[in-house]
Amino acid sequence: MKVAVLGAGAIGAYVGAALHRAGADVHLIARGPHLAAMRQYGVRVLSPRGDFTAHAHATDDPAEVGPVDYVFLGLKANSYAACGPLVEPLLHERTTVVAAQNGIPWWYFHRHGGPYDGHRVESVDPGGAVSAVLAPERALGCVVYAATELEAPGVVRHLEGTRFSIGEPDRSVSGRCLRFSEAMRTGGLKCPVEPDLRNDIWLKLLGNISFNPISALARATMRQMCLHGGTRRVIEIMMRETLDVAEALGCEVGVSIERRLAGAEKVGDHRTSTLQDLERGKPLELDVLLAAVVELAGITGVPVPTLRTVHAISDLLALRSAA
C-alpha cells in the first residue's frame, strides 16, 4: 500500500508514522522546520502507549512521490479548494482520498439517498470548488477521535485516543475501506469501518460546533466554558439545535448532551483548535463547523436561532482576524 500524507502536521504525521510501522510505503508531505526535522530524524511519536520513531520518506514536492493508493488529507478543510496542485500529482485512476476533517464534509450528500441526494453544501463547497479538486467519488470519510500536538518540529505528542472511524458515503463496506482499516490497525490504531459514518460526523460535531466558536469568542478553555453557568447553557442550546438538524437528516448521535458536556469538562484547560488558530493568526475553520449546519437547518426547515446568532458573531471575528 502506497500512502501520501498531505499536510503531515500533528495528526497527519501521527497517522503516517503508524502506517509506516505497519509496513506501508508512506510519504509525508510537509514544509518548513517540521519537514527538515522529519527528514533528518524521522517522526518521533511520544505517547502514553509507548514512544516510537518512524523514518518515512518526507518531502515538500508531491511530484517526487507520484501516484499513490491513498491520500490521507491532514490539511484544514478551508484549504481544500486550493490544494489542487498538491493533490494532482498523487492521483491515479483509483486513488482514494481519506479526508480527516472536522465538521460537515464536502461529500456529505454524495450517494446519500433520499430527497437531498447530490445536494451541494455551499458553505463547504462554494460553487463546487472543492469537488472540482477532490472528486466525491474518491472520498472515504474519516472522523478523528485522537488528540495530538506538535511538541517540536518532527516531534508529535500523542495525548489521548487512537480511534479513526472511516466509512463510505454510500454506506457500503468496501474493499478500500477494509484495506485501509487493516493497515491502520496493524500500525496500532483503532480504525472501525462504520456502516453510516454520518452519525459519527454529527457526534464529533456536537462538541466542535459549540465549544470551538465560543472558545475563540471568550478566549476560554474547555473547563472554563463548562464551569461558567451562562456559557454552559448557551452551549447546551447549541447542541440541542445541532441534534435537531441531525435528526431531520436521519442521523442518530446516541449520546446525551449532559454526557457530552461531562466529557468535555474532564478534558480540563484545553484550548480548542479554533482558539489556537486565532492566537496564531491563522484562518478560523468555522465554515464546516458552524456555517454548514446553519445552511442545513435552512434546507430542512429546522429553527436554530442560537446557532445563527453565534455564527453571525464568530463570522465577524473570523473576518477581522483575517484582515
Image: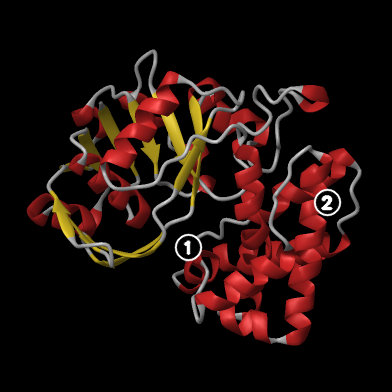
What percent of the width, then of the height, locates residue 309?
82, 65
Residue at mark 1 to residue at mark 2: CA–CA distance? 31 Å
Q: Amino acid at mark 1?
A: Lys
Can the viewer see residue 287 in this picture? no
- Look at 59% across and 71% down and name the residue there: 264
162 up-or-down from 319: above or below = above
Q: Which residue is mark 2?
A: 244
Q: Secondary structure at mark 1?
A: loop
- Look at 49% across and 45% down and name the residue there: 79
The N terminus, quarter of image? top left
Q: What is the crowding at mark 2: few (fewer than 14 residues within 10 Å), some, or many (at least 20)?
A: some
- Look at 56% across and 25% down and name the residue there: 136
Q: What is the crowding at mark 1: few (fewer than 14 residues within 10 Å), some, or many (at least 20)?
A: some
Question: Contact, CB < 8 Å: mark 1 with mark 2?
Answer: no
Of residues 191 and 146, the one drawn nearer to the viewer in this rendering? 191
Q: Which residue is mark 1?
A: 282
Of residues 163 and 120, the one drawn nearer to the viewer in this rendering? 163
